[in-house]
Image (cartoon, grey):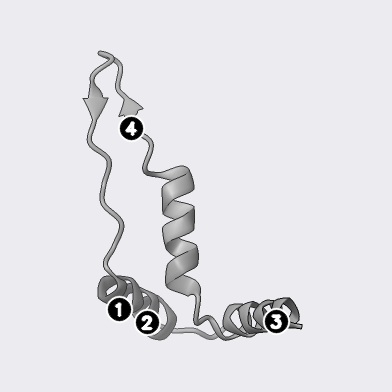
């Protein structure tokens, strides 16, 4: 029963976007945190993930700035 409640809660968080920052961190860790080598085989510093505040500021700016209609 507890597992079903946890699964339901994860589903609700996903639908409402409440877990967007956690998803961003997971994506960042999987795709951007690996040290990449440049052409001279020297480790290149990777960028740090955004803070929670910066992430939501950027998300809101993308959603609400600019014209969002077809014509």
Residue 71 visible here: no
**Mark 1 vs 2: CB contact within 8 A:** yes
How far apart are the two marked residues, 4 and 3, measured between alpha carbons? 39 Å
Task: Give the mark nearer the N terminus: 2 vs 3.
Answer: 3
Question: What element does badge 3 sit on?
Answer: helix
Q: Residues within 10 Å of mark 2 (few under 14, many from 20)?
A: few
Task: Kindly report the distance in space between the C-alpha atoms of the residues bearing marks 4 and 1.
Answer: 27 Å
Rendered view: 42 above or below 33: above
Camera-side residue of 41 and 9: 9
Q: Nearer the viewer, mark 4 or mark 3?
A: 3
Please rate how many residues cluster around mark 3, counting C-alpha atoms within 10 Å: few if below 14, some from 14 to 19, many from 20. few
Q: Quadrant of the N terminus?
A: bottom right
Nearer mark to the viewer, of 2 and 3: 3
Q: Mark 4 = which residue?
A: 35
The residues bearing labels 2 and 3 have C-alpha atoms spaced at a distance of: 34 Å
Per the model, the C-alpha gap separating discs 2 and 4 is 30 Å
Q: Nearer the viewer, mark 2 or mark 4?
A: 4
* Residue 60 disc label: 2
Name the residue that disc number 3 marks. 2
Mark 1 in CB contact with mark 3 (< 8 angstroms): no
Residue drawn at x 71%, y 76% as measured from the top left: 3
Q: At numbered mark 2, what does the secondary structure look like: helix, strand or loop?
A: helix
Image quadrant for the C terminus? Answer: bottom right
Which residue carries the number 1 mark? 57
Q: Which mark is residue 34?
A: none
User: Do the CB atoms of the residues marked 2 and 4 lie less than 8 Å apart?
Assistant: no
Q: Along the polypeptide, which appears first: circle 2 or circle 4?
A: 4
Q: Earlier in the sequence, mark 4 or mark 3?
A: 3
Q: Return the x and y of residue 15 as percentages of the image width and height.
A: 63, 82
């Amino acid at each position: 029963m507890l597992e079903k409640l946890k699964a339901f809660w994860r589903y609700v968080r996903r639908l409402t976007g409440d877990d967007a920052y956690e998803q961003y961190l997971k994506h960042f860790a999987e795709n951007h945190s690996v040290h990449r080598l440049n052409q001279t085989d020297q480790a290149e510093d990777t960028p740090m993930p955004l803070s929670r505040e910066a992430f939501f500021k950027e998300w809101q700016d993308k959603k609400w700035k600019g014209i969002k209609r077809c014509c």
